Image (cartoon, helix red, strand yellow):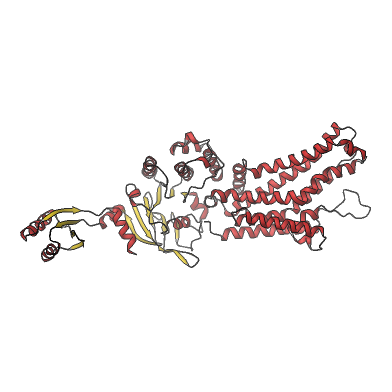
Amino acid sequence: MRSLYISYFSEFYKSRKTLAFWAAIILPILICGLIAFGFYSSSDRVLKSNYPGLILWAQYSGAALNVMGMLILPFYVMFMAFSVNNIEHKNDTWKTLFSQPLNKFSIYAAKYLYALTLLFICLFLFATLTFASGHLLQLLVPKYTFNDYNPLLILVKFYSKLFLASLGILSLQFILSLIWSDFLKPMGIGFVGTIAGIITANVGWKHAYLIPYSDPTLALRVTRAKGAKIEDFPIFTQEIWVSVIFAIALFIIGYFILSKRNIK
Amino acid sequence: MSNFAIETVGLTYNFGSQTVVKDLSLQVPKGSIYGFLGPNGAGKTTTIKILLNLLQSPSDQVFIFGKEINANRIASLKRMGALVEQPAIYGHLTGKENLVNRCILLGIKKSKYTDMLNIVGLTDAANKKAAQYSLGMKQRLGIALALISDPELLLLDEPTNGLDPNGIIEIRNLMIDLTTKHGKTILVSSHLLAEIERTATHVGIINKGQLLFQGTINELQDLSKPSVKIETNNQEKAIATLVNAGAEIVQQNEQTISVTFKTKADMGNMNTLLVQNGITVFSIGKERKDLENLFLDITSKN
């Protein structure tokens, strides 16, 4: 346990000056900032539609959620999984890392956990900033109806779904980046996977949920039981299960790959 | 308890079908500076990686302080510090941050980095990004990283690579200091004998994965027997005369003959003998093969 904590802490220490770490913070700030600015500067047009609170929140948060689920999130996950591993490939430090008196599994698990943390920070900021900036807009443009509805539960549920749905991609990309030191292979595979994921999800192929890359897109499609409240939708749908199962299986496989591999 | 810091017993290691290390039996006594010599590609780095358990050795072949490495990986690594090939340094971190990161991983006090920077003379460059370091500075930082946990056993793979003569002398003195004053054991690999001749107490020579010589530096020196090198105006006659007199010809080329050295008096007698037989002796002198040639001899034999 101590080994794991030490390795995890060291991951933070050594990557705190890298883009992968800052991207987790800058990305939500940038995107939420842009959307908020859009809603502020063209408030006249938005106000014309006379949205009630719930719909306004849906429009507002949807602007971030939709691009996230489709494109930004898979690419961020790919880039981050690459970056967490590349820090060792680039500096040729795998051998030093594995000659420290630390449990091999801890070193591996700490890296994975760190990637998971970055993903969590990124999505947590998205949710928080969406919520906060909505209320800020309300202050700036008093005619908005953001105060009429509390979107907290919906936001938390959607972003939780998104987090869980991207675990499959994360684990897959993590292994690819662990095996290959170059940028092109994991990125190329990830890119093709993402495109395939978007296409299969959008044409409504019934087995699309089995491809981890289409899970974030699918996760955002919500079906509710008739007459159910707007907040009532299940988190653990089949694509979430697929993603989580993929993540766990690949995490274990990744460790076996690493422990069998001789460190060059 | 074993008296060896490192002991390998018939260690064999293959990369696929290629045997990189063959029946290697290293014995590195505690407190020694063990010079691990061999030409490039002899299997030195592979051996060091096996000693660090980076490459999986067959069980019961590698022992660190008497303990089998696979079964005691973490305990063994705790007692070791290593510099393997090019120093592995995070280029985007400063020298200081590299050391602090290692302290975190080792669970030791972060303030230790100041001592280390001092020892390797990098205090002034502490806040410079390691990617901007020169090769010599990187090497020093690598040594500092290996030393920071105050390990009993140091594995240094060509530590003076890229260092200037001053740096080489500093590292040499540091190694002597560490073993004599602090009781450490050091295994230092090199492809140049001259480089470790002055510091090493023990030597192991490896080529093509096989150990060709192992022993103290004096034992290595004893291997090179002194000879008498003679230059005359009549090579053939000189050889015939000397062989008749019972001398043992070690080597001969167009101009000179080398004969086993026995005593100074014997050398004088040979001179007299040659002159009395009407041969002009241009030069005669005692010669000792230097270790470098000996090393080349040993490694080129197989």
Judge by depth and name the residue closer to the eye, B76 or B47. Answer: B47
Q: Residue at x 61, y 60 (%)?
A: A256
Residue A52 x/y as whole percent: 92, 41
Number of numbered discs on residues: 0
Residue A148 x/y as whole percent: 90, 38
Quarter of image, res B262 = bottom left
Quarter of image, res A175 = bottom right
Q: In this view, does A263 lie to the left or right of B31?
A: right
Residue B200 x/y as whole percent: 34, 49
Q: Residue at x 72, y 44 (%)?
A: A122
Q: Is residue B120 left or right of residue A211?
A: left
Residue A235 x/y as whole percent: 81, 53
In this view, the residue farthest toward the left is: B276
Judge by depth and name the residue closer to the eye, A244 or A6. Answer: A244
Q: In this view, does A38 lie to the left or right of B152?
A: right
Q: Is residue B27 left or right of residue A33?
A: left
| Residue B103 in sight here | yes
| Residue B80 in sight here | no
